[in-house]
Amino acid sequence: MKREVCTGCSLLCDDIIVRSDGLFIDEIYGACLKGKEHFDQVISPNRIVKPMIRKEGKLISTSWDEALNKTIELIKESKDPIFYGFSTVTSEAQLKGLELARIASGYIDSNSSICHGQVLDVAKKTGISLTTLSEIINKADLIILWGANAAESIPRLLGKIVFSRGKFRMTGREIKTLIIIDPVKTASFNVMGVRDIALRIEPGKDFELIKMLKEECCTENSIPEKGIAGIDKSDLKRLLVQLTNAEYGVIILGQGILQANQKLNVIEELLELVEMINNKQERGRISLMTMGGHSNMVGFDQMTLTFYGKRGGIKFENGNPIDSDDNIISKITRDNFDLMFVVGSDPIAHFPKALSSKIAKKPLIVIDNKKSATTMVADVVLPSSITGIESGGLMFRLDMTPINVKPIIKPPSNVLSDQEILEKLIEKFKGGGK
Ligand code: SF4
């Protein structure tokens, strides 16, 4: 039995016990259902174990050589390729993806740009007070889930941060107040106790709520009698008391707040509110944590920031990054691409129909270990090993802590890691020139 890291989601739990002989996984202890399903992917009927290319409208199995050569042929024919995904692979593979995009003069982005990456973009202007899981476990007395259904998307997060006993505290759950701000009564509401506060905000009214909280921070008694955004006055007062009196509060931001308020500067307002409270607070502070779900979504942003000084979305031309206002959505919306290369993601299923139908019309290459709506319409499918189970490398947990993951078993014969596939493509691309 060995302690291993689960790569089923961005929590990267490093306390999973696995019994394995190096060929098969016999037992897994401590993983949540989502983690167990991730390990089950090894023997899933949905698994892809052979390279495939589309011939006469049908995807058929082929050799690695033919699949890689076809991929290079398509990339070389393309004038404006998009490289997308990279959120469930190691950072070593992400760097190879960046290199391939660079030599192919393409645009590269990860799922982060339509998720938590927006927060980091805004933070360039306002600054941001981030925190780590250890800080929350050891110090937090206030945890706010804002549009974040942690119980279902990061199943063990609440167990670790709400029900744990911190190093610097004599007590655990008893002193932690959980506040959930969400229009939907999600599964996360089920863990609430008597001292916790459930705030069912009206959909898309987060901006109004934050504005009012900012106003109340400056001028007391500015809460309207009838409340705001569907939340009554007494609950708003309780929320403010918690925010301004917490010794160590954390706001965990989920898709709910990011997606529902895209046209408003809701993140900018929220970051300003946090700064305002922290400036006023004498004994405590409020921090933020974003709750992106993919196992190494944070890693892609770390790589682009480290090597290109920019978070996410990079356009290359003649081997160099160039300034571009484009993002993945604007590029697809404006049909500003002629090929899509997807790594470990399923944009056909996840993007709105108007965008996915544009993607499906262009040449499509996918690296993945499981069948998806995207592999079904792809022109080339390259099978990859499962990161954290069959191949290892560096990943970044949702709080941006680097975690090294190691392979537990060998991948099926003839299956390569994402990094190895990308390395072969780079080699072939350079061999022939564009
Ligand atoms: S919470 Fe995420 S990382 Fe932890 S066991 Fe579940 S799926 Fe795996």
Image (spheres, rainbow, N blue to C red):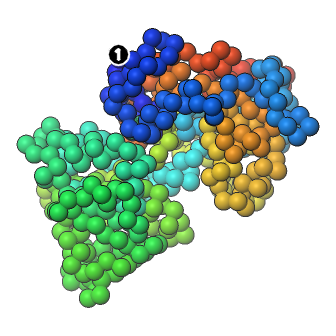
Q: Which residue is rendered at x = 16% and y = 41% of the image?
A: 165
The residue positioned farthest toward the bottom in the image shown? 225
Q: Position of residue 407 (x, y in %)?
A: 49, 19
Residue 381 vertical position relative to residue 189 in the rendered view, above or below: above
Q: Which residue is rendered at x = 69% and y = 45% of the image?
A: 373
Q: Is residue 119 visible?
A: yes
Left or right of residue 269, residue 234 in this image: left
Of residues 31 and 143, the one drawn nearer to the viewer in this rendering: 31
Q: Which residue position holds label 1?
A: 1
Q: Position of residue 111 (x, y in %)?
A: 57, 47
Residue 283, picture quadrant: bottom left
Residue 420 vertical position relative to residue 83 in the rendered view, above or below: above
Left or right of residue 32, residue 81 in this image: right
Residue 308, picture quadrant: top right
Within-10-Å neighbours for mark 1: few <14, some 14–19, many 20+: few
Q: Is residue 320 visible?
A: no
- Residue type highlighted by circle 1: Met
In terms of image quarters, where does ligand 1 lie?
top left
Q: Position of residue 332 (x, y in %)?
A: 72, 55
Look at the numbered disc 1 and say if its residue's Cβ is closer than 8 Å to ligand 1. no
Quadrant of the rendering where the N terminus is positioned: top left
Residue 411, picture quadrant: top right
Quadrant of the rendering where the C terminus is positioned: top right
The residue positioned farthest toward the right in the image shown? 56
